[in-house]
Image: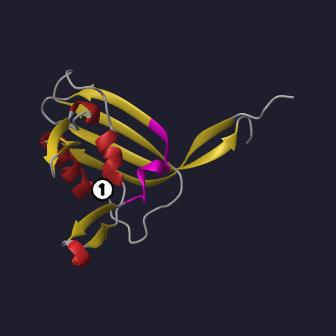
Amino acid sequence: MAVPQQKWVWGELLARFVVPGEPAAKGNSREIVQFGGRAALRKGDKALAFESTAGLHVPKLEKPYGGDVGVSLRIFYASRRPDLDGSLVYDALQNRTTWIGKGKERKARVEKRLIVNDRQIRLKHEEGFVDPARPRVEVAVYKATLMLAGAA
């Protein structure tokens, strides 16, 4: 007997927005730094700057969406040189936790964004273009539903 096949389906639009600038490829933008005598990797300055800019343009919801989503990205680079990589955009969609204070006084502050966590992204569509005059990322986020293939 054949096993039913599953398929993700694009649903209702949650948000559409544009982020100015071009994202750095996450894998190519890591830096080695020292923390307390041990080496660690962190995002590079260009990646951190883009992620900060993207965070300003992501819609903020009082109650971020917690279900599965599909994300469509149209990335316009200044040249053909960069790799097509929307990872930093996906990071910017999710709630962001920052830590304030030290020791027993340390507290978490959560900045609510569009979705709770980027693990909710189950469907991705990325296209790369060149626009030297106006590098940007056009983002559309949709609800996603898991369906049995062939089901209506």
Magenta segment boundaries in residue numbering = 114-124
Magenta segment includes 90: no
Name of the residue lying farthest toward the top: 80
At x 23% / y 30%, what residue is drawn?
28
Name of the residue lying farthest toward the bottom: 105
140 left or right, relative to 55: right
Question: On screen, 134 above or below 130?
Answer: below
Name of the residue lying farthest toward the right: 1
Q: Quadrant of the N terminus?
A: top right
At x 13% / y 43%, what residue is drawn?
45
33 left or right, relative to 120: left
Which residue position holds label 1? 58
Question: On screen, 112 above or below 44?
Answer: below
Q: The residue tagged with tag 1: helix, strand or loop?
A: loop
Amino acid type, callout 1: Val
Residue neighbourhood size for the residue with mark 1, other residues' Cα within 10 Å, grouped as few (<14), some (14–19), many (≥20): many
At x 39% / y 46%, what residue is drawn?
140
Magenta segment includes 115: yes
The percent coordinates of residue 18 (x first, y second) are: 27, 47
Q: How many marks?
A: 1
